Amino acid sequence: MTELLVPDNLKSGVKTPHRYEPDMNPTYNDMAQHYGVAVIPARVRRPKDKAKAEVGVQIVERWILAALRHHTFFSLHQLNRRIAELLVHLNNRPFRKLPGSRRSQFDALDRPALKPLPANPYTYADWKKARVNIDYHVEVDKHYYSVPYGLVKQEIDVRLTVNTVECFYRNQRVASHTRSYRVGHHTTQRGHMPESHRQYGDWSPERLVRWARQYGSSTAEVVTRILQARRHPEQGYRSCLGILRLEKTYGPDRLEAACQRALLLGTLRYKSIESILKHGLDQQPNTPEIESPIPDDHDNIRGPSYYH
């Protein structure tokens, strides 16, 4: 592998061209670091900065592209095979004013100076910016990955490969996850949680629903809906535990009745269910009162004759 690359200011390699400090594309720069190569882009509109490459393009146009201009190929494989044949001929073609050929000069000068390739091949990775949400997760392709909770609201860099997701803050890796393609789901590491959330880490949605089902189907339905309504299920654990612990104060029958009433009212919150129990609304009938129909004869009703 060579030690230095001098590319054009191609967008996939150089994000923002600059005479002194060009801003490199993260993916391109990541590849260069893997192979231990320094990248020094040519100055804008200065082809002489890479004169060897420009001359090489000119030679290939003359001895390969020009030679194929009257040929018709019916597959990419045929074209590549013919280009490879002409390339061997070009490299072995003797110089006019110097001894040897491009192949012999490469074997004598370039090959001994090349560095060996890394033991592991380069793994392609995309980079993106992401802001840490208040639930200490970042969204990547509609999946949510945790980072240390102290980085809430901070902007971080995310490196994506086929199998991994790595999060960096100020060039320091702060999280690493196995990549998941499940849309709308979360991948959370226990060490990223604040202490107040970590104490609920041993709980699971299934365990909470099983506990609620002991008191009745309405209680289980309330717990299920609370967990499903949260972007991250752990956000609903505290609310569910609070509701289930109301049974110690009011008993399982009243808790079930209160949850049944909360489902009818559509108020699936701990404070709402607690208020229902505190004011004894769970002991009132759940059937809504039927309002009496509007009378046909009333002083405030003009009737159809008014409009004739």
Image (spheres, rainbow, N blue to C red):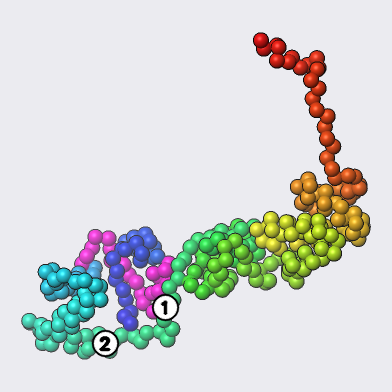
Rendering coords of residue 237 (x, y %): 75, 62
Q: Identify the image quadrant of residue 91.
A: bottom left
Which is more N-terminal, label 1 or label 2? 2
Q: Is residue 216 left or right of residue 42?
A: right
User: Looking at this view, is 69 or 219 the one in front?
Assistant: 219
Q: Is residue 101 left or right of residue 167?
A: left
* Residue 34 on the magenta segment: yes
Which residue is denoted by mark 2 in the rendering? 111
Residue at left offset 34%, top offset 61%: 11
Cβ–Cβ under 8 Å for marks 2 and 1: no
210 to 118, vertically: above or below: above
Q: Is residue 289 left or right of residue 176?
A: right
The residue type indicated by label 2 comes to Arg
The residue type indicated by label 1 comes to Tyr
Rendering coords of residue 247 (x, y %): 89, 59
Which residue is denoted by mark 1 in the rendering? 122
Quadrant in which the N terminus is drawn: bottom left
User: Looking at this view, is 31 or 262 the one in front?
Assistant: 262
305 to 29, vertically: above or below: above
Quadrant in which the C terminus is drawn: top right
* Residue 276 on the magenta segment: no
**From the viewer's perspective, is the residue at label 2 or at label 1 nearer?**
1
Which stretch is magenta?
A: 26-48
Residue at left offset 80%, top offset 49%: 262
Rendering coords of residue 208 (x, y %): 78, 65
Q: Residues within 10 Å of mark 2 (few under 14, many from 20)?
A: few
